[in-house]
Image (cartoon, helix red, strand yellow):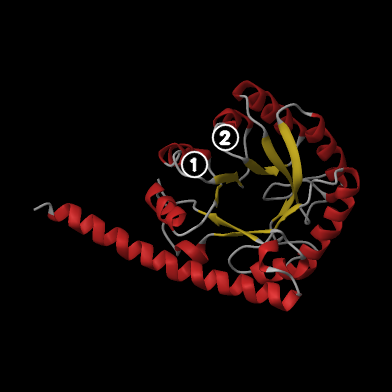
Amino acid sequence: MDTAGLTDAAGLADRKAELATNLAEVEKRIAAACAAAGRDREEVTLIVVTKTYPASDVRLLAELGVRHVAENRDQDAAPKAAACADLDLDWHFVGQLQTNKVRSVVGYADVVQSVDRAKLVNSLSAAAVRAGREVGCLIQVALDAEVGGRGDRGGVAPDGIGELARLVAESPGLRIDGLMTVAPLAGPYAGEQLKAFKRLMDLSTDLRRAHPAANMVSAGMSSDLEQAVAAGATHVRVGTAVLGVRPRLG
């Protein structure tokens, strides 16, 4: 008897049960936040951030109905996406992206949520055209950045959104989908997640005047998804609350 196989099967069954429990709890939180905000549950899409977790977890999540997954490091994401290429998933890249990783990322990412500079847009466009793909782009907004600057964790200052969005919209192989932010750790919005996310919604309204289809607003994580839903976010990015705490790979 293959006892190792039985152990693996039992381990996967236990992990699937754990993920199902965690997903159900996150779903309750999103549903409650939608109800409190007077929004339909269908208005908010859950993206599960699977960084540091193995491809086996992605497969279990897919079995549990998850359709959107996110990664923030290409060296982890590329082999994981390849191992799960048979699954019906939308892959989001959410980390700071260096231009030397663009060609790899464009091979699997349906949406890049961390677009924050013209050089990156140009690289993404060239790689998308070469790959024969259309890649959705979110402008990452740094609410802690000075005018004309960038944030400590990436992102462009609000005054730079318009020009960058125009460049994306005019670039072959790319599509401007909306905005993304991470709640800032410094500046006027530090510790004020709801205010930060409401500011992002105002910026989204401005963006949609020029780009009506760019209606995606990605904000909120495990600790502040309720504030993001209350502000009007269309997508929340949840990792720890679904997958638990795990040491980094490598």
Q: Residue at x 65, y 67 (%)?
A: 225
Q: Residue at x 31, y 62 (%)?
A: 13
Q: Secondary structure at mark 1?
A: helix
Q: Residue at x 81, y 59 (%)?
A: 201
On residue 43, which mark appears?
none
Nearer to us in this view, 6 or 78? 6
**Picture coordinates of residue 236, whole percent (x, y):** 64, 60
Q: Residue at x 63, y 43 (%)?
A: 96
On residue 105, which mark appears?
2
Q: Amino acid at mark 1?
A: Ala
Among the 4 quarters of the image, the one containing residue 130? top right
Q: Residues within 10 Å of mark 2 (few under 14, many from 20)?
A: many
Query: Contact (CB < 8 A) between labels 2 and 1?
Result: yes
Q: Is residue 201 visible?
A: yes
Among the 4 quarters of the image, the one containing residue 184? bottom right
Answer above or below: position of 23 versus 170: below
Q: Is residue 111 left or right of residue 141?
A: left
Report the Cα–Cα distance between label 2 and label 1: 8 Å
How many marks do you count on the picture? 2
Nearer to us in this view, 150 or 127? 127
The residue beneath circle 1 is: 77
Q: Amino acid at mark 2?
A: Val
Answer above or below: position of 179 versus 85: below
Answer above or below: position of 63 versus 25: above
Q: Residues within 10 Å of mark 1 (few under 14, many from 20)?
A: many
**Picture coordinates of residue 209, whole percent (x, y):** 91, 48
**Picture coordinates of residue 226, whole percent (x, y):** 67, 71
- For the C terminus, the quadrant is top left
Answer above or below: position of 188 versus 69: below
Q: Is residue 198 left or right of residue 67?
A: right
Q: Earlier in the sequence, mark 2 or mark 1?
A: 1
Q: Secondary structure at mark 2?
A: helix
